[in-house]
């Protein structure tokens, strides 16, 4: 018998989308879809959707989700609307859902979901599982890094990606001809996911569990999309991995933390040669 599905839909403010997606993602199957308004109206103008197989546990799950969403309201992330549940009879819902994910173009790259056949000729393709790159949309800091990796010279250059997550930045560097590319992440789950993605994209990237301190050698480009406190803490290790004329790309710096972050790197003789800002996120290219 084909399973029946419950569609869960939660209206949410843009700022709450990521947290709501995380909650629905804990229970849902097959990922999360986010409907973004064509014209932002403010308020709960996004809709986060997920699907559950209807079984003996779905009632309890929906109730747990309601509780979790209730707690989330307390964080003041912006308005979150009522959870709506409806039965989905259409066997083709999965296809319809997949069709919502269109390839995303950023700089020289195009990121496409694993099932999409779209093949733009003039872009370097990054194939990723939707759970990682789609759904909540790419984080602005990831976009900033992809834009930076579109611009810097990478052909034949060595690249280290610290905090690789899905592997997206390391894969992007390899697609631009960087070699060797090495990636690390402290989270073993990320390491597994990044290895799968590297294979899916047919790029050879050693991906290890650990951080900048665990990698030997120096690299022409070091990229680290982390958060300001971590960047400051591991700054000496990032600097130690950088070749004498290398470029360090850091992202995930909040505007209020920019001064202290720059100061931490200035003490290591690294100063900003480029700066971009997206929402409240600052990305810096640093050199000696
Ligand atoms: N590079 C990806 C993922 C960024 S998320 C992108 O741009 O989209 C940040 C990642 O850094 C997470 O996967 C987290 O597990 C990892 N991380 C956090 N602290 C770290 C540290 N000190 N060293 C290495 N990786 C770290």
Image (spheres, rainbow, N blue to C red):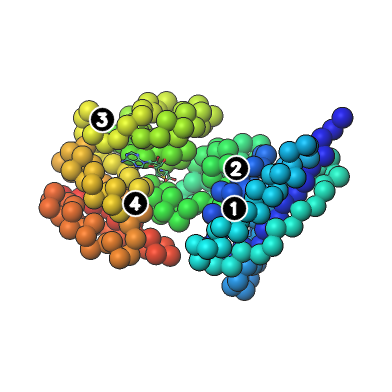
- Which residue position holds label 2? 26
Q: Is residue 237 left or right of residue 223?
A: left
Q: Disc 4 beta carbon < 8 A from ligand 1? A: yes
What whole-number distance in Å separates the C-alpha atoms at marks 2 and 3?
A: 32 Å
What whole-number distance in Å separates the C-alpha atoms at marks 2 and 4?
A: 24 Å
- Which residue position holds label 3? 214
- Which residue position holds label 1? 68
- Which residue position holds label 4? 227
Q: In front here: 109 or 191?
A: 191
81 over 135 or under it: above or below: below
Residue under the image location 40 percent in, 38 percent down: 164
- x, y percent for residue 266: 15, 55
- Please name which of the two marks, 2 or 4, marks the residue nearer to the observer: 2
Q: Residues within 10 Å of mark 3 (few under 14, many from 20)?
A: few
What whole-number distance in Å separates the C-alpha atoms at marks 4 and 1?
A: 26 Å
Q: Quadrant of the N terminus?
A: top right
- Please name which of the two marks, 2 or 3, marks the residue nearer to the observer: 2
Q: Residues within 10 Å of mark 4 (few under 14, many from 20)?
A: some
**Sequence-earlier tag: 2 or 3:** 2
């Amino acid at each position: 018998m084909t399973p029946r599905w419950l569609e869960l839909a939660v209206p949410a403010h843009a700022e709450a989308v990521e947290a709501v997606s995380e909650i629905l993602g804990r229970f849902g199957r097959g990922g999360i879809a986010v409907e973004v308004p064509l014209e932002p109206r403010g308020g709960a103008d996004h809709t986060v959707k997920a699907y559950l197989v209807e079984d003996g546990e779905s009632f309890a799950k929906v109730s747990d989700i309601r509780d979790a969403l209730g707690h989330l309201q307390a964080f003041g992330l912006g308005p979150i609307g009522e959870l709506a549940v409806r039965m989905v009879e259409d066997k083709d819902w999965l296809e319809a859902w997949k069709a919502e994910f269109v390839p995303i173009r950023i700089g020289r790259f195009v990121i496409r979901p694993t099932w999409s056949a779209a093949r733009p000729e003039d872009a370097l393709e990054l194939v990723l599982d939707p759970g990682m790159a789609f759904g909540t949309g790419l984080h602005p800091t990831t976009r900033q890094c992809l834009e930076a990796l579109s611009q810097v010279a990478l052909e034949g250059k060595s690249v280290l990606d610290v905090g690789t997550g899905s592997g997206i930045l390391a894969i992007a560097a390899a697609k631009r001809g960087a070699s060797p590319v090495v990636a690390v992440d402290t989270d073993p789950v990320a390491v597994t996911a990044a290895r799968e993605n590297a294979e899916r994209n047919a790029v050879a990237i050693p991906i290890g569990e650990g951080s900048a301190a665990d990698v030997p050698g120096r690299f022409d480009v070091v990229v680290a999309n982390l958060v300001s406190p971590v960047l400051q803490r591991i700054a000496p290790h990032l600097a130690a991995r950088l070749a004498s004329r290398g470029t360090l790309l850091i992202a995930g710096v909040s505007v209020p933390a920019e001064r202290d972050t720059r100061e931490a790197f200035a003490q290591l003789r690294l100063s900003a040669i480029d700066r971009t800002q997206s929402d409240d996120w600052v990305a810096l290219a640093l050199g000696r």
